[in-house]
Image (cartoon, helix red, strand yellow):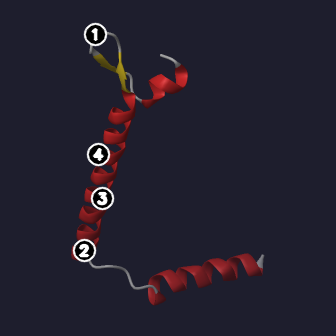
Amino acid sequence: MKKIVGYFKDSYYELTQKVTWPAWDELQNSAIVVSIASLIIALIVFAMDFTFGIQKISFGQFIWKGLLGFLYGA
């Protein structure tokens, strides 16, 4: 039991005294970068899904099923 208590005490000490936490401005900047990167990746995935999901019917008409439409035959 002493080892478990010692572990939690050491962990608390390390998190409060040894770890350097980012400042609020740095945290906001990182959140903005992550949000923009997520949006770009989502747009790329959407473009790929749209490109592979277009299906030609007859007489030059096109329909979009999406990638999952091809996989499940919807």
The residue closer to the viewer here, 14 or 70, is 70
Residue identified by numbered label 1:
59
Expressed as whole percent of the image width and height from the top left, the position of residue 67 reads 44, 30
Q: Is residue 35 above or below residue 7?
A: above
Question: Quick one: SS at disc 4?
Answer: helix
Expressed as whole percent of the image width and height from the top left, the position of residue 39 reads 28, 51
Q: Earlier in the sequence, mark 2 or mark 4?
A: 2
Residue identified by numbered label 4:
43
The residue closer to the viewer here, 30 or 66, is 66
Residue identified by numbered label 3:
37
Q: Earlier in the sequence, mark 3 or mark 4?
A: 3
The residue closer to the viewer here, 23 or 17, is 23
At label 2, the amino acid type is: Trp
Q: Earlier in the sequence, mark 1 or mark 4?
A: 4
Q: CA distance from mark 3 to mark 4?
A: 10 Å
Q: Residue at x 32, y 79 (%)?
A: 22
Expressed as whole percent of the image width and height from the top left, the position of residue 27 reads 28, 71
Q: Residue at x 26, y 76 (%)?
A: 26
Tag 3 near tag 2, CB within 8 Å: no
At label 3, the amino acid type is: Ala
Residue identified by numbered label 2:
24
Q: Quadrant of the N terminus?
A: bottom right
Mark in the foreground, 3 or 2: 3
Q: Residues within 10 Å of mark 3 (few under 14, many from 20)?
A: few
Q: CA distance from mark 1 to mark 3?
A: 40 Å
